Image (cartoon, helix red, strand yellow):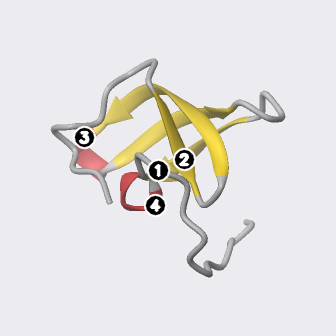
Amino acid sequence: MISLRELMVNTVYYYGIRPLQVLKVISQVHMAKIRFLDTQEETFLDISGIREIPSTDKYITINC
């Protein structure tokens, strides 16, 4: 897991095995606006799920 201080805009990170680019960090709620590089989809994620290397850990996606 990456810390809020280390999170850099326009740097490639991973959510699971999916590469993403951080567009904006919203520190008050520990969220980041991101763009998945494989689909160009933009969304918001909790920064606790963003990693510097791909993760093969099992995780559950919650769609609202």
Q: Which residue is mark 4?
A: 49
Disc nearer the start of the sequence (3/2): 2
Q: Nearer the viewer, residue 59 or 32?
A: 59
Check whether the beta carbons of the residues at disc 4 and disc 1 lie within 8 A of each other: no
Dot 2 alpha-carbon crowd within 10 angstroms: few under 14, some 14 to 19, many 20 or more: some
**Which corner quadrant holds the N terminus?**
bottom left
Q: Classify mark 2: helix, strand or loop.
A: strand
The CA span between labels 4 and 1 is: 11 Å
The CA span between labels 3 and 1 is: 22 Å
Disc nearer the start of the sequence (4/3): 3
Report the disc number at residue 63.
none
Q: Which residue is mark 3?
A: 27
Instruction: Give, as a three-letter code, the residue at label 1.
Output: Ile
Disc nearer the start of the sequence (3/1): 3
Q: Residue at x 66, y 79 (%)?
A: 60
Check whether the beta carbons of the residues at disc 2 and disc 1 lie within 8 A of each other: yes
The CA span between labels 4 and 3 is: 15 Å
Q: Classify mark 1: helix, strand or loop.
A: loop
Q: Residue at x 29, y 51 (%)?
A: 2
Instruction: Give, as a three-letter code, the residue at label 3.
Output: Ser
Residue 31: give x, y in percent of width and height.
Answer: 39, 47
Question: Which quarter of the picture shows residue 61?
Answer: bottom right
Q: Which residue is mark 2?
A: 14
Instruction: Give, as a three-letter code, the residue at label 2.
Output: Tyr
The CA span between labels 2 and 4 is: 8 Å
